[in-house]
Amino acid sequence: MSTKEQQERIELLQGTLDLLILRTLQLGPLHGHAIAKAIEFRSDEVLQVEQGSLYPALHRLIKRNWISVEAGTSENNRRAKFYALTAKGRKQLSVETNKWEKLAAAIAQVLKPARQEER
């Protein structure tokens, strides 16, 4: 396996959190803690988003211009950064969703036993 292939596979794993963040922000701007809580809530608490993973992902998405950031005040009256999906991010959400659906279908196909294996 080439170094490029390894990097693409690692990027794919990192991209999962990116996709979840983009999808969460599709509903409107949120601060970091609210993004993590929304992902946890929508996954029935199966997915736990740690700050050590969330904030690097947010910075990566800002760098790619998929999300923007603005200062604001949180619901408990504290200063917070609010993240919002950009037009470029909306397009990328569609691309990433399609990639994820293809990946999930391919994995499901591999996990599904072939009729010959059942015999």
Image (cartoon, rainbow, N blue to C red):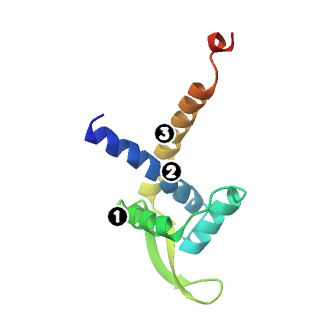
Residue at horizontal 55 percent and vertical 32 percent from the top: 107
Spatial CA distance of label 1 from label 3 is 21 Å
- SS category of the residue bearing label 1: helix
- Disc ID at residue 63: 1
Which residue is denoted by mark 3 in the rendering? 99
Which residue is denoted by mark 2 in the rendering? 16
Q: Marks 2 and 1: which is nearer the front?
A: 2
Which amino acid is tagged 3?
Lys
Would you place residue 4 above or below residue 36 in this image? above
Pick whichever of labels 2 and 1 is earlier in the sequence.
Answer: 2
CA neighbours of label 2 inside 10 A, class few (<14), some (14 to 19), many (20+): some
Residue at horizontal 51 percent and vertical 36 percent from the top: 103
**Residue 62 x/y as whole percent:** 39, 65
Task: Report if residue 79 is visible in the image.
Answer: yes
- Residue toward you, 65 or 31: 31
- SS category of the residue bearing label 2: helix
Which amino acid is tagged 2?
Thr
**Residue 110 x/y as whole percent:** 56, 26
- Residue toward you, 72 or 51: 51
Q: Quadrant of residue 59?
A: bottom left
